[in-house]
Structures are given as structure tokens and as C-alpha cells.
Image: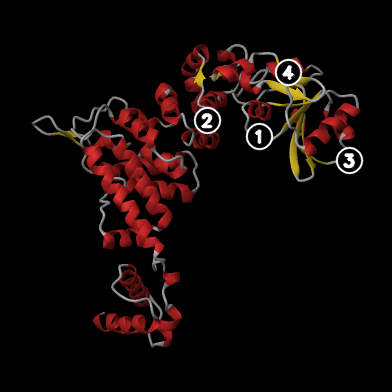
Amino acid sequence: MFQIAIPQPVEEILSALEAAGFPAVVVGGCVRDSLLGKTPHDWDVATAARPEEMKQALSRFRLAETGIRHGTLTVRNQGEAVETTTFRQDGSYGDSRHPDTVTFTRSLETDLSRRDFTVNAMAYSPKRGLVDLFGGQEDLQAKVLRCVGNPEQRFTEDALRIVRAMRFSAVLDFSIEPATGEAILAQKERLRYLARERIADELKKLLCAPGAARILGAFAPAVWEMIPELEPCFGQQQYNPHHFGTVWEHTLAALEHAEPILPVRLAVLLHDIGKPACFSREENGVGHFYGHAAKSTEIADAVCRSLRLDNALRERVMLLVRYHDGPMIGNEKLIRRRLRQLGEEAFFQLLAVQTADTLGQAEPYRSQRLPQLAQVGELARQILAERPCLTMDALAISGRDLIAAGMNPGPEMGRVLRRLLEAVSEGELDNTSAVLLNYAQQIREKI
């Protein structure tokens, strides 16, 4: 019989419920991941015990009534926090997101039948083994994502399942079963009514997944419901020898090659979003998108704000979009300047965006540009290996030293410190206090 290695803290919860006379299983993603040979991040327990019965059966553990109205307790045991929920049947979904009512049941089959996808509708316990009523194991083997029951009904009940279907397919690199795919497109307008934060949470996971470009391409109309600013890219031809296909096709090709780092993937998705608004064409038919980086930055900012992304992520994405088309050449002085201006992390993320952008372009431009970008990366790593001075904190002197040397605090001191950092980072000065104080005095005299 198939066995899942359940962590001891979770097994103790199952055992306590079974000892009290209530069937209990681990269910959902932890079963799916175990069947795929992955280590589950979270373990969820479902049981025939009603909430009050759960509290009594699990009284020796620390309990938190995190979702008691829907039958969920969070059980803490040996550092594990395990959501434990009564088998239930959902009522109608008035808001296309949450059930209006929940009915508790003793039936595991009823509970599994309300779940979203077959691969998430499996349960397991050491006593019962694997419970797979809807072909989840077969779909895992075939690498297919399929709704439990009628997909139209599943998505009508909860519109977030539309994005979750796209996300699971991208993360697991599964195909989407045809009827489920048709329902995604048929129900896509329901995405308008979801909380933007919930859409953002799913998009973040989708974008960094192996199948991101494939899924975004296959279900583009659903993507445009979430980010309508992308739709004009779909039909925008480029008419330029550096490119092939439309702006949308280029975006997907670049995304396919982008490093799976959230700011990089998000910047690549949005890097050319301003192109349709900047399109012009010469008399000879060649297309141009003058000023598209600035326009794309403006639109990317609006998209990030609409998705309620945190400020740090939004600002990083804007930086990467703003400079995605800027010069990156193998010049040591320029690279030192960029490392100082951007910081190491942002510098290499920008290099990753430019590399992905180039890989999404046409030959021969691609084969000419890629070695240049590789050289930039190698030079930057060599510079960093020398442990250069790239931040104010790394300077051999500080504002206190300048005050001690007779300089007044204020904007003038800030300008002096920035010039000192620039000179040291670009190799013009040694980073020693004597050299820097002498140079500071020269700068003051010029000012």
C-alpha cells in the first residue's frame, strides 16, 4: 500500500482525532506534493469531528480558532501549525469568492467533491491509505490539471480558482485539460471582481514558475482581465529588423528566458507595455518606439499600484523597466558607476532583464548583443571580487570627519561625500582618510 511520510506532529493530531472516534486525513496540496516526490510546505488535516468535538479531542494541543465559523482550527504541536478542518459541504457563492453557508458533514467524499482540482482532491491517512475519488493520481501521472466536476461551476463558485488553475499549471508545468481551459476563458470576466491583493499573490507565484510564458500566452484574455494595460501589446506589430512578431510575442519570448526572480520576471512582463503608445513608422516602413522605456515605466508604476504591490518591489520593477533599454557595455569605469548607482543586486537584475529582452529579439542582433552582456557580467564580478567601495558606509571617512575638519553640515557636505564616493568607486582615489580629506578640501575650494 502507498505510504506518505507524515511528520510526527501532524501524525499525533491524526491519532488524537482517530482515538476520539473521528476519521481524520491529511488532504490537498501535501498529498499532491508527496505523490510528486516533493517535500510539502504545509500539512492540512480534515476530519469528521465537528468544531466542538475537535476542540475536545485536541485539547492537549494549543488551539487557535482561526476559521471556526467554517470549521477550521489551527493546531500547534512541536513548532508545527496545522490547519484542521471539519469535513464540509459549501452552499451557494453569492460573491463568486466565498460560500454563503457551510454545512458540516461526516462524509469525506462530500468534502473532497467540493475541492477545486483533481490533484488537490486526494486524501491520505495511515489507517485508510490514499483516497482518490476523482482520478487525481492519474492526472498527476499525465501532468494534467483538471477541475473536480463541472469546471464552469467550479469557477462560478470561486473566481480565484481561475488564477489558481493558471498558477498550478505554470508551477507544476502541467497542461490544462480542454474543458477546464475553455471554462477559464468563458469565466474570465469574473476576475474583475476579485481583490487585487489576491490576484497579485497568485501572479507572483505564476510569474516565477517554469510554465509562466506558456500559460500567459495560452490564456492571454484572462491575463488582460487582471492587467488590462497589456492588451494593446497583443496586436502591436513592430516592423523592425531587431524584432519578430508582435510586442506581446516578444514579451512572452523574453519571459521564457528570464531568470525566475520576481522583480526580473515582473519587469520583463511590463518592460515594453508602453510601446503601443509610442509607435511610429518611417516612410520606408521601419517601426520605432521612441520614448517607450519612460512610457513603460509610467504604466508599470500604475499596474504595480493597482495590484497593491509593496513599495520596495514596485520601485525595483520601475527601475528595471526604466533602464531595460539603456547602455550596458564592457567599460570598467561605466560598470563601476552603475554598480555604485544601482547596487549589486539591482545591477545584476537589470543585466538579467536586458539578457532576457535580447533573447526575445531577432537574429543577428541577438548573437551580437549576448556576448556583450556576458562580458559586462564577467567584468562586474571581477570588480566586486576586489571588494570596491560602492556605498557611503564603505568610505574611509564620514560626515563626522568632515565636520572635524571644519566643514559645516548641510547640502554642501552631501555633495562632497557623493563626489568622494564617485572618485573612489571609479578608481580615481585611494580609499584612505588622508587622501579623502585632502581631496575634500580641494572640492570645497572649487565650490
Whole-percent x and y of residue 261? 46, 43
The alpha-carbon separation of the residues under discs 1 and 4 comes to: 18 Å
Q: Is 27 above or below relative to 55?
A: above
Question: Contact, CB < 8 Å: mark 2 with mark 3?
Answer: no
Label 3, label 4: how far apart the Cα atoms are: 28 Å
Amino acid type assigned to the residue bearing label 1 in the image: Pro
Of tags 2 and 3, the one toward the viewer is 2
Residue at position x 38%, y 36% in the image: 257
Mark 2, secondary structure of its residue: helix
How far apart are the alpha carbons under marks 4 and 2?
24 Å
Residue 73 occupies quadrant: top right
Tag 1, which secondary structure? loop
Query: Image point 61% across, 15% down: which residue?
Result: 138
Q: Is residue 402 left or right of residue 83?
A: left
Is residue 290 found left or right of 388 in the rendered image? left
Check disc 4: other Cα within 10 Å, few if <14, some if 14-19, many if 20+: many
Residue nearest the viewer, comparing 180 with 131: 131
- Around disc 3, counting alpha carbons within 10 Å, would you say few (fewer than 14), some (14 to 19), or many (20 or more)? few
Which residue type carries mark 2?
Val
Q: Which residue is mark 1?
A: 40
Q: Which residue is mark 2?
A: 171
Mark 3 or mark 1, whichever is nearer to me: 1
Name which quarter of the figure residue 111 lies in.
top right
Alpha carbon distance from label 1 to label 2: 14 Å
Of all residues shown, which one is farthest toward the front? Answer: 1
Q: In terms of sequence position, does the residue under pointer 3 or pointer 4 come before the other? A: 3
The disc placed on residue 60 is 3
Q: CA distance from mark 2 to mark 3?
A: 38 Å
Residue 89 visible somewhere in the drawing = yes
